[in-house]
Amino acid sequence: MARATVYAQAGAAGTKPPPGAKRGPKTTVSDAVLIVAMRQVLAESPFHGEGHRKMRVRLRALGHRVGRNRVLRLMRETGLLAPQRAGHPHGDPAHAGTITTTRPNVMWGTDATRFYTERDGWCWWFGAIDHASDDIVGWHVAKIGDRWAALEPIRAGARLAFGAFAKDVARGLTVRSDWGPQYIADAFTSELAWLGITHSHSFVREPQCNGVIERFIRTLKEQCLWLHRFESLEGARVIIGAFIERYNHQWLIERLDHRTPVVARQELLAAA
């Protein structure tokens, strides 16, 4: 055997890693340290059930630059992942085109949901969300979920986004809603027209067409409505208002590069 071959084999044997050792480059922070940091993030977060992508962003804010796959693996191994719900298929109309916009105040989505209070029984939440920045521009809670209650988020949004509640102040804006009785009432459609707003209806039985507000309502339920036992409508108003304030300023939106709704609105308006 050639002398070079003998030396090469001896060198390879001397550098062979021990059985069971992890291959590849060494990381700057151990799994144990990362797991402690993850538990700290979850304990201090004002939200519940955030996934591995948002965990990676929040770890980065703590100075830990970690790969997404590693975060996912550690969260799975330690049982820190949020439960996932299986969806169901929808037809082509649900996914034709896009409902998001690149600039704020081009399209808002509006919808409603109900919640229970001990003293006042079932009550209503109405809201409006911007399809570019995902911020809640207006919301309202009421005992009676009629057309007048449905208008309150639009009125609040007009004052916030356009600085006034006046004729044609929101010209160029489109509001997307479903076919609920509140949204087809003459009072609702007439006021939208007075504000200069174009009214757009979603497809019947296809909530994805109004998916931006639908997704927020799911978040509202999981992060607020289902976690509290409301004593009264007024008590619920305070708790829900505090959550929406946290959402607008702290919730991370993946499609917006994990920016918060308020930051996204500011930056998108500045770039327009």
Image (cartoon, rainbow, N blue to C red):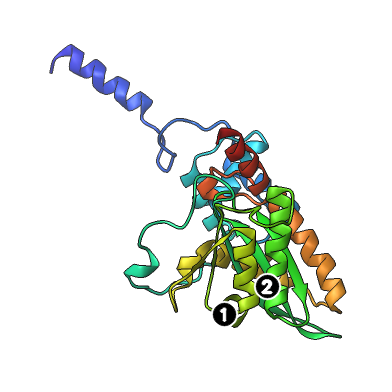
Q: Quadrant of the C terminus?
A: top right
- In the drawing, does residue 13 fall left or right of residue 185? left
Q: CA distance from mark 1 to mark 2?
A: 10 Å
Q: Which residue is pictured at 65% across the width and 39% down the height?
A: 266
SS for dot 1: loop
Q: Is residue 40 in sight in this rendering?
A: no
Image quadrant occupied by the N terminus: top left
Given the image, on which type of amino acid does mark 1 rest?
Answer: Gly
Q: Residue at x 62, y 68 (%)?
A: 217
Q: Please say if the residues under marks 1 and 2 sit with CB atoms less than 8 Å apart.
A: yes
* Residue 214 rendering spot, x and y as whole percentages: 56, 67
Question: Could you say where residue 4 lies in the image, as x and y percent from the top left?
Answer: 19, 13
Residue toward you, 197 or 220: 197
Q: Which mark is residue 94?
A: none
Q: Residues within 10 Å of mark 1 (few under 14, many from 20)?
A: few
Q: Position of residue 66 (x, y in %)?
A: 54, 38
Q: Which mark is residue 180?
A: 1
Q: Position of residue 263 (x, y in %)?
A: 65, 41
Q: Which residue is mark 2?
A: 150
Relative to 22, is 167 on the left or the right?
right
Q: Amino acid at mark 2?
A: Ala
Q: Is residue 204 above or below residue 9?
A: below
Q: Vertical placement of 32 versus 117: above or below?
A: above
* Quarter where residue 245 is shown: bottom right
Give left or right: position of 155 versus 214: right
Q: Earlier in the sequence, mark 1 or mark 2?
A: 2
